[in-house]
Image (cartoon, coloured by chain):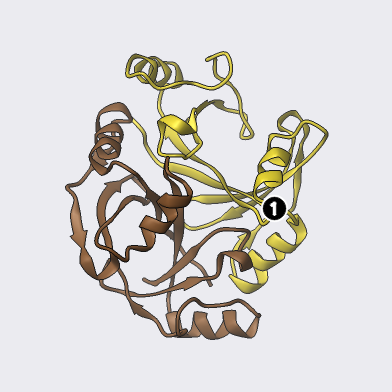
Chain colours: A yellow, B brown
Amino acid sequence: MIGRLNHIAIAVPDLDAAAAQYRDTLGADVGAPVAQPDHGVTVVFIDLPNTKIELLHPLGETSPVAAFLARSPAGGIHHICYEVADIEAARDRLVTEGARVLGDGEPRIGAHGKPVLFLHPKDFNGCLVELEEA
Amino acid sequence: MIGRLNHIAIAVPDLDAAAAQYRDTLGADVGAPVAQPDHGVTVVFIDLPNTKIELLHPLGETSPVAAFLARSPAGGIHHICYEVADIEAARDRLVTEGARVLGDGEPRIGAHGKPVLFLHPKDFNGCLVELEEA
């Protein structure tokens, strides 16, 4: 069911410093910051040859990333995103298997303009898993 | 400098359950458990179309993954691994830029039989980063 790893999202306390480190120290292909107010984050996309890294920094008062950084001030991996061909079919299979979908269980439009769902970390080895319709 | 994302390593408290979940619930291509006593882990490799997931479970008395699971009993992402063309050149560039290499700073042979280094999580947004010579 799951296909490609679409991205790894890393919450960072200092977006400029983290972007500079990936660009200058690690020599990666780092984009400009993009504000995504609907998702409560500012994102820097890093293109690797086979997948993406997304650096996340809180934007606004209710950012889910702010709570993450309050618990882990140095930052850390916030979630991993797998692609699926049909997000509603994936959701139905997961629910049948007993996995919990966050929110109301309906896909919403994610940061890439495609339908996404998030799965409960307690059901997936402590990892917040995003599914994105490819 | 960094190339492909070689893998994401996830520490899991129950290797059989996690492997079954990735195989049966997420429908991924999941291998058999492989004991790696030199690294203090038993590993299950999951092949995605563009990268790998490695499920890690402690093996032996001094496993670094045991300490991780003691802090995070549900499991979690243990490290991410980027490929580099020349690990000694990468190490020298990182040290010049002020990043800390774990251990004695010399590459050792990793779980895939290739030279690897680990970088200090405090220098990389709370993420343990492995570099592997591709």
Res A100 visible: yes
x and y, in percent, of residue B71 in the image: 48, 50
SS for dot 1? loop
- What residue do we see at 41% from left, 34% from top? A124
Please tell me whether residue B83 is drawn above or below residue A114 in the rendered image.
below
x and y, in percent, of residue A94 in the image: 37, 21
x and y, in percent, of residue B114 in the image: 30, 74
Q: How crowded is mark 1: few (under 14 residues within 10 Å), some or many (20 or more)?
A: some
Quadrant for residue B59, please give it: bottom left
Residue A39 vs residue B108, the one in the foreground? B108
Q: Which chain carries label 1?
A: A
- What residue do we see at 36% from left, 56% from top? B66
Name the quadrant of the N terminus of chain A.
top left
Res A50 visible: no
Residue B106 vs residue B51, the one in the foreground? B106
- What residue do we see at 51% from left, 45% from top? A7
Q: In this view, does B131 lie to the left or right of A113?
A: left
Image label count: 1
Q: Look at label 1 and name its amino acid.
A: Pro
Q: Is residue A14 left or right of residue B65?
A: right
x and y, in percent, of residue A84 in the image: 41, 29
- What residue do we see at 26% from left, 43% from top? B15
Residue at label 1?
A73
Quadrant for residue B38, please give it: bottom left
Q: Is residue B22 left or right of residue A132?
A: left
Please tell me whether residue A40 is drawn above or below residue B108 in the rendered image.
above
